[in-house]
Amino acid sequence: MGSVAQSVYIAGIYEHPTRKAVDKSLGQLYFEIAQGAVADAGLSLSDVDAFYCDTDAPGFGPLSIIEYLGIEVRHYDSTDVGGSAPMVHLSHAAQAIATGKCNVALVTMAGKPRTGGRGLDTQPNWAVPELAFELPYAHGVVDQYAMSAMRHMYEFDTTAEQLAWIKVAASHHAQHNPHAMLRDVVTVEQVLGSVMIADPLHRLDCCVVSDGGGAFVVVSQEIARQLKRPRVRLRGAGEAIRDLRGGTADITSSGAVVSGATAFAEAGLKPSDIKYASLYDSFTITVLIQLEDLGFCKRGQGGAFVSDGKLISGVGKLPINTDGGGLCSNHPGNRGGMTKILEAVRQLREEAHPAVQVRNCDLALAHGTGGWLASRHGSATVILERV
Amino acid sequence: MDVQTLTPLTPVPPVSPETEAFWDATATDRLLVKFCNSCNKVHVYPRAHCPFCFSVDTEWRESPGEGEIYSYTVIRRETPPRVVAYVRLDEGVILLTNIVGCDPNGVHIDQRVKAVFPRAEDGPCVPAFVPASPTQELAYRRECQGAESHEKD
Ligand SMILES: [Zn+2]
């Protein structure tokens, strides 16, 4: 197979329990997630020799946070593709470990959108080539996802009820997560009855806004063998960029078409092999389109695939986001990729809540969509295996 | 009918040498697109080079500014609600825009639309679209004139 991934393991994970970090600086959140992840692996911060973060980390690239933590690294990467960055970082860390550039890679993400901690850019950067042709139309992130949903409904007769089932499934899982922001089980009727934000997306079609973050530790096979932790191996990874392509794009699909196929090919697996999936759930439509793009169902059939509780652990055939996901539990820093990887590792370790633990969960997938579904986004897929 | 406010669309982009001709044209109610003489394709947003074949042999062409709504959403968080959309020009490309001069609740995919050029207070006019019926366009133009005469008061 020629895969560099298959000798690399996730040895430690940590999700910060906070959802509103009133009394902590962003730096403190980074320290706590870093400390938490290395401790979970049975390592210490002095063992870390590679560091990964996105550009929401305060400072110039990774420099300030590396200094703040006090770690010394020989490899680093601050590739930023929004919420899909942690999947990309995992893949890049695996490549670096496989080629001997490092042995213990710490991948982090934290943010404080609820309580501040990062100043907003006030001046548009007009050097961004598309900006003059988009910013005047004054639309937000949710409007991009709404336009994908609207077109998907038009082309495939997808319904608002079907999208609502994705939120319902998340709420069924979140009731078991003591850290989840929204723990009440909701019904399809409640989703459809919540205020309309951007047609056809209601308030309950949108993820939470939370402070917090998480981290994981990627190690070489040699180190994984020394640690007394369940072994979770990276079996395949893929990344892609989707954009408007000069005005020829199809906004009912995403970069997951490419990143998913790449990851499955590298893993030598197919979608039906996957026991659990963590799918990016910035909005309900994000999940539905990823299910189609990753090959869990045929294009246009996502609506039927998600209906009637089919995503609920113990009920449906493909449990997703058993921590409650971004829709109910946590979407720290407006980026959901980290928590997706963490819950996939918990499932593979059989450390998910017993009420949502998937039986014999040996293969899991985590996918991120970072950016704007209907224009440009980074897509990244990772396939993890318990060995 | 809940006719939307047409101006100002903010923030207003500055003009760069690469796209100056585009903004010069919108000031006279014309929509330009970039055409590639090498592969004969139209692209948006306009670039000096062609993003399909990478040729720099591109030229401006005037578009009739007609097309249909490819997708849209109604931004319900604003009062009054506002429509952001992708319009597919008859040339085949989709571009981001606003649908203005009509009731947002009547907007639908495949609706025929035509470009209009709302006046911003500073800087270039930004193309938007109205439903392509003579009465809609007339209503839109009357409202623009009303807004302009009001500014002179
Ligand atoms: Zn060309």
Image (cartoon, rainbow, N blue to C red):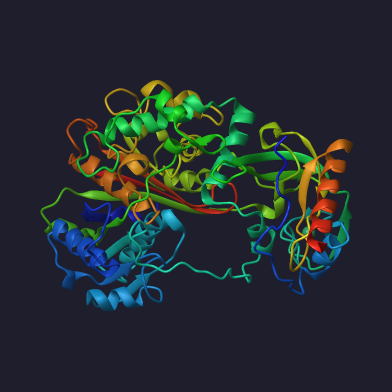
Asked whether residue B133 appears in the rendered view, the answer is: no
Q: Residue furthest top?
A: A308
User: Where is residue B41 shown, x and y percent of the image?
Assistant: 81, 53
Dividing the image into four equal quarters, which quarter contains ligand 1? bottom right
Q: Residue furthest front?
A: B153
Q: Quadrant of the C terminus of chain A?
A: top left
Camera-nearest residue between A9 and B13: B13
A249 left or right of A11?
right
Residue at 30 percent of width and 62 percent of height: A107
Residue at 33 percent of width and 77 percent of height: A64
Residue at 48 percent of width and 41 percent of height: A286
A225 left or right of B91?
left
Camera-nearest residue between A4 and A185: A185
Asked whether residue A248 appears in the rendered view, the answer is: yes
Above or below, A142 against B52 in this view is above
User: Where is residue A189 shown, x and y percent of the image?
Assistant: 42, 23
Above or below, A332 against B121 in this view is above
Residue at 38 percent of width and 75 percent of height: A59
User: Where is residue A178 shown, x and y percent of the image?
Assistant: 19, 41
